[in-house]
Amino acid sequence: MSIIVQEALDSDILRACEVEVAAYSNAADPNRLGPILFPGPFPPDAQEKRAAKLIEERKEDPSCIFTKAVDEETGELIAFSKWHIYETAALAAAAEKSVNIRPGMNVEACTMFFSGLAKRKKETMGNKPHIYLHLLHTDPDFQKRGAGRALLRWGTTKADTVGLPVYLESSPAGHPFYLKHEFADIDRFDLDLRPFGGPEEPYITPLMLREPKSSL
């Protein structure tokens, strides 16, 4: 399979949302956070509204870039990533956002998880210029074929060009992938899922950073 990386168009975002839902619902992932955060039911137009919100965010936020990995033979979008490039302290300082609660989401669990991650990121990065990999999802039917690696390479190449570190929050399943690609653990965020019917063990989100590589 030949994969190309391009900036995603508005017309790609609905398909990107479909990939996002499939990734969160992946039964092959033993650390299934998705069903707790997004138990449903969802209104029929849930994905259309999610897509519209993402398109609006990109138009209003100068730091926001969407990229897509495409099967060159079929033209199908098989993976999607959302980046924020905070090249100045002012952009980083303006990065705080409230949790966007939508119908079908577990309000308490989502608030604890996403607000907790945002708080930890702010504590770690402050207003320092950096790149934030907010989302990277691959269609489960196309995993292990290099799509995620291609999207990550786009971002790390950009980071090296502008001389900025890349910060991300990894899923447990994605952790070995990011370690392999020069990200290091700098902290972790633990979420107690027992109040929501989850296991005794907390859901662990590794917080990771990759320093830029010198072009010399």
Image: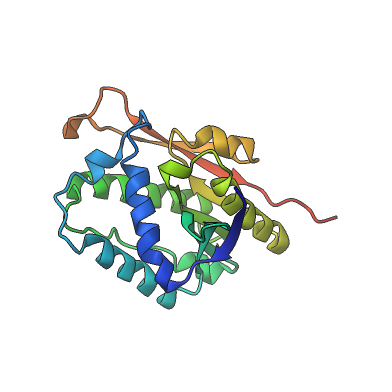
Residue in the picture at 69% in, 64% down: 162
Work out whether residue 127 can be spotted: yes
Where residue 109 appears, as percent x and y from the top left, is 23, 44
Relative to 198, is 215 on the left or the right?
A: right
- Residue in front for this viewpoint, 5 or 62: 5
Does 207 sit above or below residue 97?
A: above
Residue in the picture at 34% in, 46% down: 22
- Residue in front for this viewpoint, 169 or 178: 178
Relative to 107, is 145 on the left or the right?
A: right
The count of marks equals 0
Work out whether residue 129 can be spotted: no
Residue in the picture at 51% in, 54% down: 133
Quarter location, residue 191: top left
Q: Residue furthest bottom?
A: 59
Where residue 78 appears, as percent x and y from the top left, is 47, 53
Residue in the picture at 52% in, 56% down: 132
Does 158 sit above or below residue 177?
A: below
Where residue 35 appears, as percent x and y from the top left, is 24, 39
Q: Residue furthest right?
A: 216
- How is the rendered protein coloured? rainbow
Where residue 20 appears, as percent x and y from the top left, is 37, 51
- Residue in front for this viewpoint, 150 or 97: 150
Q: Residue furthest front?
A: 73
User: Which quadrant: the C terminus?
Assistant: bottom right
- Residue in front for this viewpoint, 176 or 167: 176
